[in-house]
């Protein structure tokens, strides 16, 4: 379902892919996040996604009440508290997506798929 923004002069429909790309870009800017991840069904390996395919690691759904749920599959930096990374990511993305779309973010789910050592 697409997101809806209703104004005095009409309605704007926002595709979930647009929201996913924006949310993914906001998430990668967060401290402790290396990038989005995708699990290969064929061999079960976790791959770090490039910026062009970032939306594969982000799932967005919009419910009947026009509220957004976002699922992130991320890879984190080794040595940083995962709860701190998750809290930072949730607050940052929630603020940016709500400001960008004018819609309410109901829930953000984070799945840590891997850890990377950064030199």
Image (cartoon, rainbow, N blue to C red):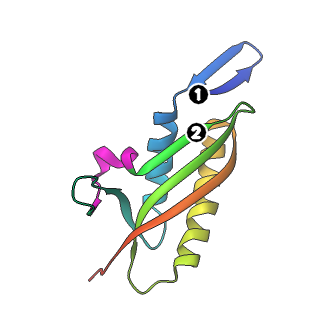
Which residue is situated farthest in the left direction here?
A: 43
* Residue found at x 36% / y 49%: 54
Where residue 10 appears, x then y in whole percent? 70, 13
Q: Secondary structure at mark 1?
A: loop
Residue at 47% across / 71% down in the picture?
Answer: 31
The span shown in magenta is: 46-56
Residue 61, which numbered label?
2
The residue furthest top is 9
Find numbered disc 2 in the image and state the secondary structure of the residue it sits on: strand
Q: Which residue is mark 1?
A: 1
Name the residue rendered at 52%, 39% in the picture.
19
- Vertical comparison of 118 with 110: above or below: below
- The reply to whether the C-beta atoms of the residues labelled 2 and 1 are less than 8 Å apart is yes
Q: Is residue 14 left or right of residue 18?
A: right
| Residue at 53%, 52% in the rendered image | 71
Q: Residue 21 in the image: x percent, y percent?
A: 44, 43
Quadrant assignment for the N terminus: top right
Question: Residue 104's spot in the image, x, y percent?
Answer: 71, 43
Q: Check the picture and name the quadrant holding the C terminus.
A: bottom left
Above or below, 100 against 47 in this view is above
Closer to us: 64 or 80: 64
**Looking at the rendered structure, which numbered label has been put on residue 34?**
none
Q: Is residue 101 magenta?
A: no
């Amino acid at each position: 379902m697409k997101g809806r923004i209703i104004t005095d002069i009409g309605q704007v429909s926002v595709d979930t892919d647009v929201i996913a790309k924006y949310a993914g870009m906001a998430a990668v800017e967060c401290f402790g996040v290396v990038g989005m991840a995708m699990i290969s069904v064929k061999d079960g390996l976790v791959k770090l996604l490039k910026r062009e395919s970032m939306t594969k690691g982000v799932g967005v759904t919009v419910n009947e009440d026009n509220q957004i749920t976002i699922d992130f599959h991320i890879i984190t930096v080794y040595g940083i508290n995962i709860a701190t990374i998750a809290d930072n990511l949730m607050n940052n993305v929630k603020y940016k997506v709500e400001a960008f779309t004018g819609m309410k973010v109901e829930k953000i789910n984070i799945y840590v798929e891997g850890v990377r050592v950064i030199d």
